[in-house]
Amino acid sequence: MLDIFDFISDNKKYTYIDTIQYNDKNYVAYMDDDNVYISEYTMDKDGFILDDISDELYEILIREMKL
């Protein structure tokens, strides 16, 4: 069964939670069995690219997303 809320990155399965635009950048929240992650994302012709963010920005975005 296809779950539209699951995706694979670096051979690991994650579940999509939410997206937000903050300071003109796009961020996505996603989780695995143990943790919630937030990354900046950009789109290209092959899909999307996830980039790490700082711990400080993570805390801000967690509050903004009400997670």
Image (cartoon, rainbow, N blue to C red):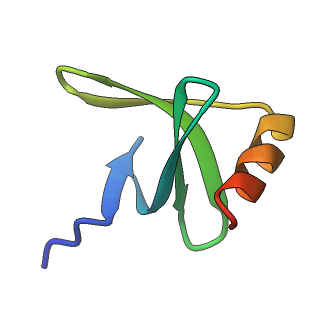
Q: Is residue 53 above or below residue 35?
A: above
Drawn side of residue 12 relative to residue 43, left or right: right
Drawn side of residue 54 relative to residue 67, left or right: right
State the image coordinates of residue 61 (x, y, percent, origin top left). Answer: 71, 47
Q: Which quadrant of the figure contains the N terminus?
A: bottom left
**Residue 33 in which image quadrant:** bottom right
Q: Which quadrant of the figure contains the C terminus?
A: bottom right
Taking the spot 70% from the left edge, 53% from the top edge, the residue there is 64
Residue extending farthest left: 1
Q: Which is nearer the eye, 50 or 56?
A: 56
State the image coordinates of residue 31 (x, y, percent, origin top left). Answer: 55, 63
State the image coordinates of residue 41 (x, y, percent, origin top left). Answer: 46, 31
Taking the spot 77% from the left edge, 57% from the top edge, the residue there is 63
Taking the spot 69% from the left edge, 65% from the top edge, the residue there is 66
Picture mark count:
0
Residue extending farthest right: 56
Taking the spot 63% from the left edge, 52% from the top edge, the residue there is 37
Q: Which is nearer the eye, 46 or 18?
A: 18
State the image coordinates of residue 22 (x, y, percent, origin top left). Answer: 62, 34
Q: Which is nearer the eye, 56 or 21?
A: 21
Drawn side of residue 18 relative to residue 5, left or right: right
